[in-house]
Amino acid sequence: MKKTKAIIRIAKVIFALVLMTGFAKAQTKGSTSLSIWDGMFIAGYVGSGAYINCGGPAVKWAMKPFSLSLGLFPAVRIKEDHQPVGVKKNAGVTPSTGIGLTSSYQHFVLQIPLFYDAKTAAANGKWNLGVGVGYKF
């Protein structure tokens, strides 16, 4: 119980720091900045399934019209759980968070995420590398 409360406190502090730095403005062009949402829609393939996300908090390096960011990807994962007969299956559509690189040129976006598949009755947990493409508004 104490560990859970400590983790929640740490998560609150990190969330507050992300919010505070997200509203900070850099004074020079081409500098590193933290953006809460970059206004993009991405669909891709990872770990024998698909994902859909809209970007997320990231550290972004921009040199117009190119940009590269390292960040988190809150996403909806769509994946069929292959289990032996008689074993309960996980849901086909689940919320998930990935981490990785996002690159954009004008309105075209290319994303290379890492998502974690949790341990199930039939398989151990593992990290999966994926690829996604999208549109930047």
Image: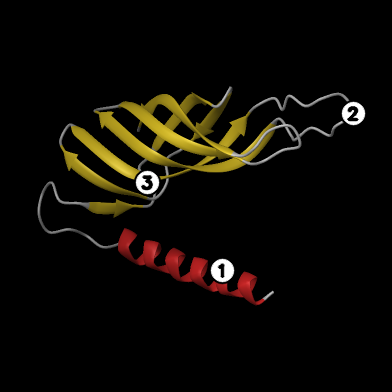
Tell me the quarter of the picture where residue 24 sits: bottom left
The percent position of residue 35, horizontal first and vertical second, equals 33, 51
90 and 66: which is toward the camera: 90
Q: Quadrant of the C terminus?
A: top left
Q: Disc 2 or disc 1, which is closer to the eye?
A: 2
Mark linked to residue 86: 2
Q: Position of residue 119 (x, y in %)?
A: 67, 41
Q: Where 110 falls versus 27 (above or below)?
A: above
> Which residue is found at the position 69% from the left and 74% from the top?
1
| Amino acid type at mark 2 | Gly
Q: Which mark is residue 71?
A: 3
Disc 1 designates what residue?
A: 7
Label 2 sits on a secondary structure element that is loop
Left or right of 25? Residue 2 is right
> Which label number is shown at residue 50?
none
CA distance separating discs 2 and 1: 36 Å
Question: Which residue is farthest left?
Answer: 28
Neighbor class of circle 1 (other Cα within 10 Å; few <14, some 14-19, many 20+) is few
Residue at horizontal 33 percent and vertical 28 percent from the top: 109
